[in-house]
Amino acid sequence: MDFIEGLPTSRGKDTILVVANRLTKYGHFMALYHHFSALIIAQAYLGNICKLHVLPKSIEHFKRIGTHLHLSTVYHLESDRQTKVLNRCLESYLRRKTRETIWDWCCWLTLAEWWYNSTFHSTIQTTPYKTLYGLPPTTFTLTGRLLYY
């Protein structure tokens, strides 16, 4: 679990909560506003992660819901390498998609999550989607500009 902070405000949000599963490499991205609390993080986690998956035995960086705490050390990439790699992928994807409209990043978060989880990962020799669900992800092509209301 990690945060990407300092983003331009998009739909009232300026932070992304990133959650990665160490086994399947599956990632989840949630937009938050910067002055978040433990309660807001817990609500985002329960509303977006726990409804889809079982509660984990451990969460890096936070101790919530009876889990074990695994803190990472600043500048010690080995302890949370997967989340840092996921963050770089997400930042790169959003940079490409919002080159001309950087305030629009929040609208691309769902597709960024789909892209990340349906893309081949060399460490698991398949996609996180297939690792988690046992089926290959469906593919689709988007044309034109996406509109979000």
Image: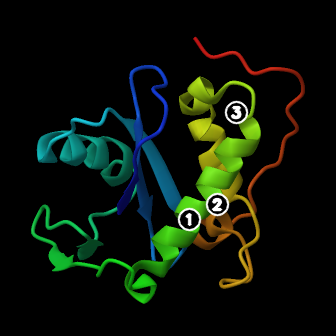
Residue depicted at x 32% and y 32%: 33
- Residue type indicated by callout 1: Leu
Q: Which label number is shown at residue 86? A: 1
Residue density around tag 1, few if under 14, some if 14–19, many if 20 or more, within 10 Å: many
Residue depicted at x 81% and y 20%: 145
Find out whether the residues at labels 3 and 2 contact each other: C-beta distance under 8 Å: no
Residue depicted at x 54% and y 74%: 24
Find out whether the residues at labels 1 and 2 contact each other: C-beta distance under 8 Å: yes
Q: Is 118 on the left-hand or right-hand side of 2? A: right
Question: Which residue carries the number 3 mark?
Answer: 98
Of tags 1 and 3, which is closer to the observer? 3
**Mark closer to the chain start, 1 or 3:** 1
Question: Which residue carries the number 2 mark?
Answer: 89
Say which of 40 and 65 sits in front: 40
Q: Which label number is shown at residue 147? A: none
Q: Is 143 on the left-hand or right-hand side of 39? A: right
Q: Position of residue 112 (x, y in %)?
A: 64, 46
Q: Marks 1 and 2, Cα distance to the nearest angstrom?
A: 5 Å
